Amino acid sequence: MKTLDVIVAVLLVVGGLNWGLVGIFQWDLVAAIFGGSGAAVARVVYTLVGLSAVYQIIFWKAIQRRWATGA
Protein backbone atom coordinates (compact mmCIF):
# COMPACT_ATOMS: atom_id res chain seq x y z
CA MET A 1 0.00 0.00 0.00
CA LYS A 2 2.92 2.36 0.54
CA THR A 3 3.68 2.15 -3.17
CA LEU A 4 0.14 3.29 -3.95
CA ASP A 5 0.51 6.10 -1.40
CA VAL A 6 3.65 7.31 -3.17
CA ILE A 7 2.01 7.13 -6.62
CA VAL A 8 -0.96 9.10 -5.29
CA ALA A 9 1.34 11.71 -3.76
CA VAL A 10 3.26 12.10 -7.04
CA LEU A 11 0.02 12.50 -9.01
CA LEU A 12 -1.21 15.11 -6.55
CA VAL A 13 2.04 17.05 -6.89
CA VAL A 14 1.77 16.87 -10.69
CA GLY A 15 -1.82 18.09 -10.48
CA GLY A 16 -0.92 20.89 -8.09
CA LEU A 17 1.97 22.07 -10.24
CA ASN A 18 -0.19 21.90 -13.34
CA TRP A 19 -2.93 24.01 -11.72
CA GLY A 20 -0.27 26.46 -10.53
CA LEU A 21 0.99 26.83 -14.09
CA VAL A 22 -2.58 27.29 -15.34
CA GLY A 23 -3.26 29.93 -12.70
CA ILE A 24 -0.06 31.90 -13.13
CA PHE A 25 0.77 31.50 -16.81
CA GLN A 26 -2.49 30.17 -18.31
CA TRP A 27 -0.45 27.22 -19.57
CA ASP A 28 -1.56 23.61 -19.11
CA LEU A 29 1.53 21.40 -18.95
CA VAL A 30 -0.41 18.13 -19.13
CA ALA A 31 -2.27 19.31 -22.23
CA ALA A 32 0.98 20.54 -23.78
CA ILE A 33 2.70 17.19 -23.24
CA PHE A 34 -0.19 14.96 -24.31
CA GLY A 35 -1.69 16.88 -27.23
CA GLY A 36 -4.41 19.09 -25.78
CA SER A 37 -6.74 18.92 -22.83
CA GLY A 38 -9.22 16.81 -24.81
CA ALA A 39 -6.64 14.20 -25.81
CA ALA A 40 -7.32 10.73 -24.41
CA VAL A 41 -4.02 10.47 -22.56
CA ALA A 42 -4.42 13.93 -21.01
CA ARG A 43 -7.93 13.01 -19.86
CA VAL A 44 -6.54 9.83 -18.27
CA VAL A 45 -3.93 11.91 -16.40
CA TYR A 46 -6.61 14.37 -15.22
CA THR A 47 -8.79 11.45 -14.09
CA LEU A 48 -5.93 9.81 -12.21
CA VAL A 49 -5.13 13.08 -10.44
CA GLY A 50 -8.80 13.43 -9.44
CA LEU A 51 -8.99 9.84 -8.23
CA SER A 52 -5.78 10.40 -6.27
CA ALA A 53 -7.39 13.31 -4.47
CA VAL A 54 -10.44 11.19 -3.62
CA TYR A 55 -8.17 8.37 -2.36
CA GLN A 56 -6.20 10.84 -0.24
CA ILE A 57 -9.40 12.28 1.28
CA ILE A 58 -10.95 8.90 2.07
CA PHE A 59 -7.83 7.18 3.40
CA TRP A 60 -6.06 10.16 5.04
CA LYS A 61 -5.95 8.66 8.55
CA ALA A 62 -4.99 5.18 7.30
CA ILE A 63 -2.14 6.65 5.27
CA GLN A 64 -0.89 8.57 8.30
CA ARG A 65 -0.97 5.42 10.45
CA ARG A 66 0.73 3.35 7.75
CA TRP A 67 3.63 5.75 7.43
CA ALA A 68 3.90 6.46 11.17
CA THR A 69 4.29 2.78 12.06
CA GLY A 70 6.71 2.01 9.25
CA ALA A 71 4.59 -0.95 8.11
Image (tube, rainbow, N blue to C red):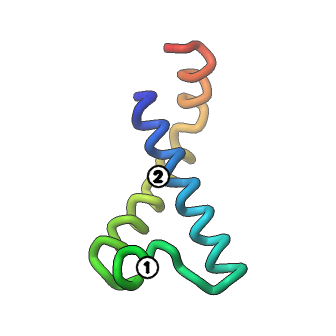
> Which secondary structure, mark 1?
helix
Count residues near mark 1 (Cα–Cα under 10 Å), then give few for <14, some for 14-19, many for 20+. some
In the picture shown, does residue 70 fall above or below 9? Answer: above
Please indicate whether residue 17 sits to the left or right of residue 2 in the image.
right
- Residue corresponding to mark 1: 31
| Residue at 43 percent of width and 56 percent of height | 51
Residue lying at 38% horizontally and 65% vertically, measured from the top left:
45
At which x and y percent is residue 43? 35, 73
User: Which quadrant of the figure contains the N terminus?
Assistant: top left
Residue 42 shown left or right of residue 23 in the figure:
left
Comparing labels 1 and 2, the label whose residue is closer to the camera: 1
Tag 2: Cα neighbours inside 10 Å, few (<14), some, or many (≥20)?
many
Residue bearing mark 2: 52
Kindly identify the residue that appears in the image at 43 percent across and 68 percent down: 46
- Residue 23 % position (x, y): 69, 79
Q: Residue furthest left?
A: 40
Residue at position x 52%, y 38% in the image: 59
Q: Earlier in the sequence, mark 1 or mark 2?
A: 1
* Residue type indicated by callout 2: Ser
Q: Nearer the viewer, residue 28 or 2?
A: 28
Q: Is residue 12 above or below residue 65?
A: below
- x and y, in percent, of residue 61 in the image: 60, 31
Drawn side of residue 46 relative to residue 70, left or right: left
Q: Which sits in the foreground, 14 or 47?
A: 14
